[in-house]
Image (cartoon, helix red, strand yellow):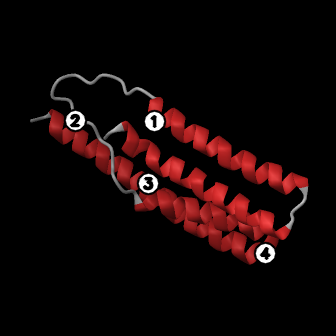
Amino acid sequence: MSALRRSLPVAAWGAFLLALAVVALIFRPDSQTVVLGFGLAVSVIVAGGSVLRARRGRRAAGDVEYTPDLSVATVVAAVGVSLAIAGAEAGTWLVAIGLGVAVAGVGGLVRELRAERRERTRVRTR
């Protein structure tokens, strides 16, 4: 997987946060909101740049690299955590739903990791 392909989701998220911070200016927010919005956006974009510049370790010849292109479980876990955090404002009912979704996402991640280990063992025994 190329460095650009690895860094694109992080940089795109930073650009989205930057756009949200710019749109928030329309509503004349207080200075704390402006600093938090733009500070977060810039820090995420910088993180995307660091992912772009990061070097991968060398692999032995014939070694298989396991890098999933898509992980639905990761997205489900992130959405669940986001719902739980939003539930702090909306109420405990949303916290409970968010935690349930997050647990389902973590279960999917455990399943993916077990499948990866099983595949790695299968490839080594060939």
Q: Nearer the viewer, mark 3 or mark 1?
A: 1
Which x, y percent locates residue 48?
A: 53, 41
- Label disc, if present, on residue 121 of the rendered structure: none
According to the picture, the residue beneath numbered tag 1 turns out to be 52
Residue located at (75% from left, 54% from top): 37
| Residue assigned mark 4 | 90
Please tell me whether mark 2 or mark 3 is closer to you in this view: 2
Q: Residue furthest bottom?
A: 93
Q: Badge 3 is on which residue?
A: 109
Q: Earlier in the sequence, mark 1 or mark 4?
A: 1
* CA distance for labels 2 and 4: 46 Å
Mark 2 surroundings within 10 Å by alpha-carbon count, few (fewer than 14), some (14 through 19), many (20 or more): few
Q: Residues within 10 Å of mark 1 (few under 14, many from 20)?
A: some
Amino acid found under the numbered disc labelled 3 = Leu
Residue where numbered disc 2 is placed:
64
Separation of residues labelled 1 and 4 (CA atoms)? 37 Å
Depth order, front residue of 74/10? 10
Circle 3 or circle 4, nearest the eye? 4
